[in-house]
Amino acid sequence: MTALAIVEAFIAAWNRNDLDAVYAMMAPDIIWDNIPMGPVTGIAGCQALMTQFPPMEGIDFVTHHIMANGNVVMTERTDKFLVGGRWRSIRLMGIFEVNAAGQIQHWRDYFDMVEFQREFA
């Protein structure tokens, strides 16, 4: 499976709200860096970060552009989260690095913290 296909499958798992599949696609020592917030390390760190968000009734990661160069995949996305009956959207750029085992090793999302705070306040 190519790095591009792996990232597309990762996004599809998020869109199904299948967090078990999401975590299964991550390397055990993944670094997930939401650039304005700071990184978390490891699957446990990713799970702990997710518990800080309100319960999500739906997820829709809309990929506007995606490209790959070897094991690096870049996305321009709008990530939408259904929380409390209202969709909340964040525009972002994401960079994924896929390791030789076909797992997401590094995941960096760049977004506007003011937009994030407005949507999740």
Image: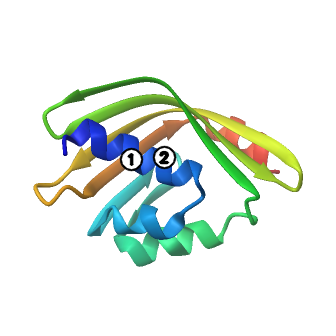
At a point 76% along the width and 42% down the height, the residue shown is 88
**Where in the figure is residue 44, as x and y percent of width and height?**
43, 78
Q: Where is mark 2, residue-wise? A: 12
* Left or right for 86, reference 109: right
In the displayed structure, 69 sits above or below 107; it is: above
Quadrant in which residue 104 is drawn: bottom left
Camera-nearest residue between 113 and 47: 47
**Where in the figure is residue 67, as x and y percent of width and height?**
30, 25
The three-letter code of the residue at mark 1 reads Ala
At a point 33% along the width and 31% down the height, the residue shown is 74
- Count of marks, rendered view: 2
In the displayed structure, 16 sits above or below 78; it is: below
Camera-nearest residue between 37 and 8: 8
In the displayed structure, 69 sits above or below 42; it is: above
The three-letter code of the residue at mark 2 reads Ala
At a point 40% along the width and 30% down the height, the residue shown is 75
**Where in the figure is residue 85, as x and y percent of width and height?**
89, 51
Asked whether the beta carbons under mark 1 and mark 2 sit within 8 Å of each other, the answer is yes
Q: Which mark is residue 112?
A: none
Q: Between marks 1 and 2, how big is the CA–CA gap?
A: 5 Å
* Left or right for 75, reference 51: left
Circle 1: element type: helix
Near mark 1 (Cα within 10 A), the count class, few <14, some 14-19 or many ≥20, is: some
Q: Residue 9 carries which label?
A: 1
**Where in the figure is residue 110, as x and y percent of width and height?**
47, 37
Camera-nearest residue between 59 and 40: 59
Near mark 2 (Cα within 10 A), the count class, few <14, some 14-19 or many ≥20, is: some
In the displayed structure, 116 sits above or below 85; it is: above
